[in-house]
Image (cartoon, rainbow, N blue to C red):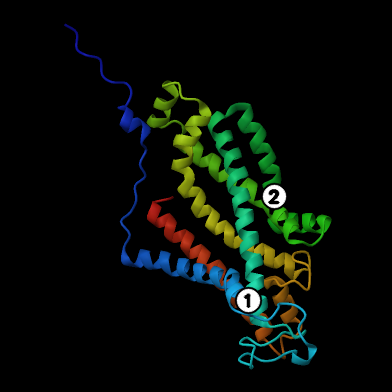
Amino acid sequence: MSAPLPDLLPAPDAAIAAPMRKKAPGRASSLRMWLPLGFLVLLAAACFIWPQIYPVPKPVGGSILEAGLPPLSPGHILGTDPNGNDVLSRILYGGQVSFEVGFSVTVIGLVIGGLLGMAAGYWRGITDTSIMRVLDVLIAFPALVLALAIAEGLGPSELHVIWALAIFSIPATGRIARSNTLAIREQDFMLAARLSGTRGRHIILRHVIPNILPQLMTFALLGFGIVIILEGALSFLGLGIPLPEPSWGSMIAQGQQVLSATPEQALIPSAFLFATVVSLNVLGDALRERWGVR
């Protein structure tokens, strides 16, 4: 009697599940995650909720008689700008712009770039070649130069800034999604799913997305910070949020003109921009370490 043939395919449960190894979070790792997360949550709440429940001065239309007041002035905790506008109010409303632009660009990049990258990595062939050539052309341009060209052509507005920066975000996210899809495409659980007759789109939804989502999320957090910097750069150059609407970048540009007399006009928005970007980067690194993302 012949010996039984060995199983060529893994057991269904083992084939379908491709668990990621997660490191047990230590105290230092937890602090690295929760401190920046707490700061970002508090800052977002202050920007979006505080003006709705607590009366703050309008960010535009200030009195020229109150121009250039120093911090801790009565009624103006952070002082006023050269046009008499309350600095704290402009910081809060400028933060709304930064979070809205960063979130919108990140979501657009994750959805469009992620789908294109997964399609290229999974189906390969002409699909891979066509998608990647387009993404390579877009990513070949320096991000700020491309954003400047698009913003100059469309004109300054928040919506135009979002689409100008999304053009940079889509190819970067697409390349990350493709490389991670290629890394798992030939693993046993993917082979078992294909041999079982599962359709390609169902494999992507059930197996590819859950396995590459941690990599995309950590990359998205790092990209979120870059987007905020680029939005600030566009506003600094006058191609982002149109004046007199508040933006951290335009506030820095305005403060630069009076830097010797009142340096806090540029330092305060710079500090908020710096703290936000650093918090996003630290949070992204902490999540990458916790999820074991390489």
Q: Residue at x 63, y 61 (%)?
A: 100
Identify the residue under disc 1.
270
Q: Is residue 259 left or right of residue 92?
A: right
Residue at 78% in and 67% down: 242
**Residues packed near mark 1 inside 10 Å, few (<14), some (14 to 19) or many (20 plus):** some
Residue type at mark 2? Answer: Ile
> Who comes first in sequence, dot 2 or dot 1?
2
Q: Secondary structure at mark 1?
A: helix
Residue 44 visible (yes or no): yes
The one of 292 and 140 positioned closer to us in this rendering: 292
Residue 114 in the image: x percent, y percent?
57, 43
The kind of residue tagged 1 is: Ser
The location of residue 183, given as percent across then percent down, is 46, 38
Provide the residue designation for mark 2.
Answer: 167
Disc 2 versus disc 1: distance between alpha carbons? 26 Å
- Mark seen at residue 14: none
Is 196 drawn above or below residue 182 in the view shown? above
Seen from the viewer's position, the closer of residues 197 and 44 is 44
Rendered-image quadrant of the N terminus: top left
Q: Nearer the viewer, residue 167 or 38?
A: 38
Q: Are marks 2 and 1 in contact (CB under 8 Å)?
A: no
Tell me if I can see residue 227 in this picture: no
Give the residue furthest to the top. Answer: 1
Mark 2: few, some, or many residues within 10 Å (few <14, many ≥20)?
many
Relative image position of residue 128 (x, y in whole percent) = 61, 32
Horizontal side of residue 28 vs 65, given as left or right: left
Asked if residue 86 is positioned above or below residue 40 in the image, the reply reads below
**Residue depicted at 48% across the width and 40% down the height:** 209
Residue 63 location (% of width, % of height): 77, 87
State the SS at label 2.
helix
